[in-house]
Amino acid sequence: MRVVYVREPELAEKLFRFRYEMYVSHFKWLNSKDYPHGILHDNFDSHSFNYVALDENMVVGSVRITLDGPKGLPLDICNPLDGFRKDRAIAELGRLVVDHRYDKNLLGALLMKAGYQCAVQYGANYIVIDIFMESQDFYLKTGFIQIGDNYDDPNFNFNGHSVTMALDCIAAQKEWPYTHPRLYRFFTTPDKRIEHRE
């Protein structure tokens, strides 16, 4: 199992079809009529860093890192971060999904590691993520804080609330060696299973 940065158009198409399979066909979070070609991508993909988890040549997981800039972040559509942006270099970690037939914890952690390392490499000092509230405890335990109120995400067919979480990367790198040493080593050390953009 490895996680790679998506460079080639062929792998990008596999990624977009995998997203469709997960978000539309399996979880039914999105409506198939909105994606008639069986692929799931948007305008943010063109200026984001996409990674996929591969089992042999099959895509079994994905994550996307979008750096804040003039085009904004995907999160702005449902939870604008204007009040949070001041003096912060922000990256959004999104489209994090793992094939339901695989170990979500193990593979999800590896994808998050790739996303974290990419965001920090390109100058982000805060990482934000839009999650379903059921996942909130995990993020709180690792140093994320909630930004704003809970909300209904209009993009998803989901009977529950979403929440935006943020991680102060600089503070985490100072605190994790003492509060979460294993987590610190995991997120900050190089990993042969992850191939970043050169």
Image (tube, helix red, strand yellow):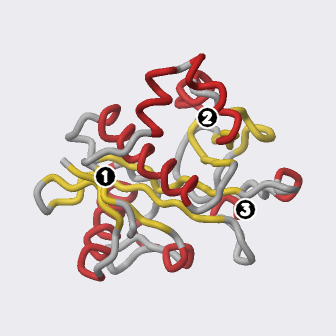
The image quarter in which residue 31 lies:
bottom left
As rendered, which of 195 and 96 lies closer to the eye? 195
Q: Is residue 31 above or below residue 105?
A: below
**Looking at the picture, does residue 154 appear above or below residue 71?**
above
Q: CA distance from mark 1 to mark 3?
A: 29 Å
Q: In the structure shown, which secondary structural element does the residue marked by tag 1 occupy?
A: strand
- Residue 78 % position (x, y): 71, 57
Task: Find numbered disc 2 in the image and state the secondary structure of the residue it sits on.
Answer: helix
Q: Residue at x 61, y 47 (%)?
A: 130
The residue that disc 2 covers is: 173
Q: Amino acid at mark 1?
A: Ile
Earlier-in-chain disc, 3 versus 2: 3
3 over 147 or under it: above or below: below
Residue 99's spot in the image, x, y percent?
A: 27, 47
Q: Please tell me in which quadrant of the rendered image residue 171 appears.
A: top right
Q: CA distance from mark 2 to mark 1?
A: 20 Å
Read off the residue under disc 1: 194
* Amino acid type shown at disc 3: Asp
